Amino acid sequence: MKIKKTNVAGGVVYFEGDNGEYKLLIIQRAKKDHWPNFYEFPRGGVDKGESIIQGLKREIKEEVGLDIIPIKFIDKFTYTADKGTRFSTQHNFLCKPTDPNQKIKLSFEHQDYKFITTPGEAELLLLPEMKKTVIKAFVLLDSNKTTISTLPEYELSKPDVMKEYLQWIQ
């Protein structure tokens, strides 16, 4: 069996809410797709001859209809797909829309979308690797506004401790 290696680009797209909180876009896979009904952030394979950033912009445009600006590299993870015949490395970026008033237009691959505003929502809705990426995105966006715990004195709510913890879970 020949294993194909591919690069995948993923974008955690954020919007700023009316009250200054950050809203991260997640999309729900279509019922007839593989991994039906699961939530994820926009992502997809990088085509031959494309850079990862070119693939990122194209995939987000195709999946949700948004033009974006990549802000910062978040992380990468690997996974196998296509019944073990494809080994993918997914490169994840924090992104913002070029125009925050753009309308989201889902592709046939997805049936719904929502915005999440807390790491706790990521815990409940996303698969483990994507959950880690989204939590890192919240920390990157604003460690002072975003807390992991509702207890103000909880150690993980301190930025340096959170960064150390996130490095440890990688």
Image (cartoon, rainbow, N blue to C red):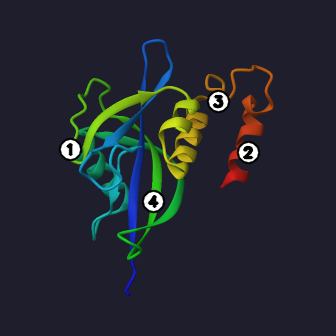
Q: Which residue is at a point 35% across and 46% down the rendered structure image?
A: 42
Could you say which is closer to the camera, residue 72 or residue 7? 7
Which label's residue is closer to the chain start, 4 or 1?
4
Which label's residue is closer to the chain start, 1 or 3?
1
What kind of element bears circle 4? strand
| Residue 107 numbered mark, or none | 1
Quick check: marks 1 and 2 in contact, CB under 8 Å? no
**Tag 3 residue:** 143
| Residue 90 numbered mark, or none | 4
Quick check: marks 1 and 3 in contact, CB under 8 Å? no
Q: Is residue 25 above or below residue 3?
A: above
Crowding at mark 3 (Cα within 10 Å: few <14, some 14-19, many 20+): some
* Image quadrant occupied by the C terminus: bottom right
Could you say which is closer to the camera, residue 77 or residue 98? 77
**Tag 2 residue:** 165
Q: CA distance from mark 2 to mark 3?
A: 13 Å
Q: Is residue 136 above or below residue 118?
A: below
Q: CA distance from mark 4 to mark 1?
A: 20 Å
Which label's residue is closer to the chain start, 4 or 3?
4
Which label's residue is closer to the chain start, 1 or 2?
1
Residue 50's image quarter? bottom left
Q: Amino acid at mark 4?
A: Gln
Q: CA distance from mark 4 to mark 3?
A: 24 Å
User: Residue 153: x and y, percent?
Assistant: 80, 22
* Image quadrant occupied by the N terminus: bottom left
| Residue 78 numbered mark, or none | none
Q: CA distance from mark 1 to mark 3?
A: 33 Å
